[in-house]
Image (spheres, helix red, strand yellow):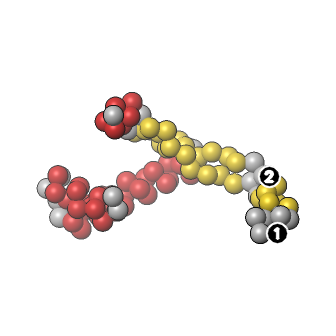
Amino acid sequence: MTKANLVDYVAENAHLTKADAARALDAVLAGVTKGLKKEGKVTLVGFGTFSAKKRAARTGRNPQTGAAVKIAARVVPGFKAGNKLKDALN
């Protein structure tokens, strides 16, 4: 499902215009991003938990040359599905 498909779905099921649904979806995504930056964790009960995980610096390998490459430390997003989401997929 693409973002456009999701906007169409929200618009139809929430009885909103596509423009309103797109703004609502953008606001939710911005809220999740802001929450991860500020607190490092966003929990949507029953759906799942988004988290910001610190990944340590490490040494990798260039697959073409085999040369060692330093990979900097960084923060990456993570997601753990909640029970309701897991159950809905089974």
Seen from this angle, which residue lies furthest left?
15
Q: CA distance from mark 2 to mark 1?
A: 18 Å
The label number, if any, that marks residue 48 in the structure image: none
Earlier sequence position, callout 2 versus callout 1: 2
Residue at coordinates 75% horizontally, 48% vertically from top-left?
56
The answer to whether one can see residue 83 in this image is yes
The answer to whether one can see residue 46 in this image is no
Residue at coordinates 85% horizontally, 65% vertically from top-left?
67
- Element marked by disc 1: loop
> Does the residue at mark 2 contact the one at mark 1 (Cβ under 8 Å)?
no
Graded by Cα atoms within 10 Å as few (under 14), some (14 to 19) or many (20 or more), the crowding at tag 1 reads few
Disc 2 target residue: 58
Q: Is residue 50 left or right of residue 54?
A: left
Seen from this angle, which residue lies furthest right?
67
Disc 1 target residue: 65
Q: Is residue 20 above or below residue 46?
A: below
Give whichever of 68, 84 is nearer the camera.
68
Amino acid at the residue labelled 1: Thr
Picture coordinates of residue 27 (x, y %)?
Answer: 36, 58
Q: Quadrant of residue 89?
A: top left
Amino acid at the residue labelled 2: Arg
Graded by Cα atoms within 10 Å as few (under 14), some (14 to 19) or many (20 or more), the crowding at tag 2 reads few
Give whichever of 64, 33 is nearer the camera.
64
> What count of labels does the image hold?
2
- Element marked by disc 2: strand
Quadrant including the N terminus: bottom left
Residue at coordinates 30% horizontally, 65% vertically from top-left?
4
Quadrant including the C terminus: top left
